[in-house]
Amino acid sequence: MILPPACSTFCSRWTEVELAIGPLDFPSYQANRVARMAVEREFIIIGEAMLVLSRIAPDIVDSMSASRRIVNFRNQLTHEYPTVDDRIVWRIIEHDVPVLRRESKSDRKAAGRQRTPSPAAVRRRQHPRRQGTKRQ
């Protein structure tokens, strides 16, 4: 399995979520607007990366236990912001982030054992009609 650049973004963001909350407990998180905004922004980026991955590397997305929930949560954060519940966000941080971080690390390790295609090879794969044609 060869990971596209969107996966790198996706994989690295779990650490950013953990850094944003630092040593905070739930009441401190709830009282800290900057921490809440940072965590929610990271979840939006993670959801967007998952959405991109679902289009270009569905096998990776299928291996993630909560891929659809990640995208749904991104949609809620983006489009239904007033309905975001801090308790749900905190539960995701405590229970889902460690699992998803492990899953994304194992995907990266598996991909590291394979050769990464050149950008030109990726473009040819995405646009097979362009193979062998040159601009004049």
Image: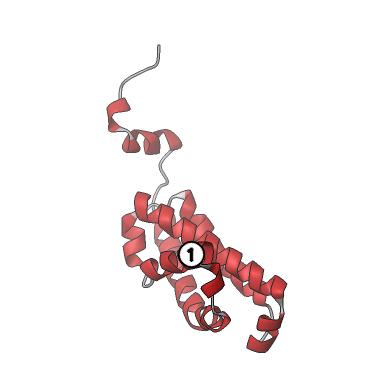
Q: Nearer the viewer, residue 48 or 115?
A: 48
Quick one: label 1, few (<14), some, or many (20+) residues within 10 Å?
Answer: many
Judge whether 123 appears above or below 11 on screen: above
Q: Residue at x 36, y 56 (%)?
A: 54
* Quarter of image, res 122: top left
Q: Amino acid at mark 1?
A: Arg
Disc tally is 1
For this view, does 33 lie left or right of residue 7?
A: right
Q: Is residue 125 visible?
A: yes
Q: Is residue 19 visible?
A: no
Q: Which residue is mark 1?
A: 74
Judge whether 83 appears above or below 47 on screen: below
Which residue in the rendered view is the most extreme toward the front? Answer: 82
Q: Percent from the top left, x then y, of residue 89? A: 54, 78
Label 1 SS: helix
Which residue in the rendered view is the most extreme toward the top? Answer: 136
Q: Percent from the top left, x then y, of residue 46? A: 51, 62
Q: Residue at x 42, y 46 (%)?
A: 116
Judge whether 9 appears above or below 104 on screen: above
Q: Quadrant of the N terminus?
A: bottom left
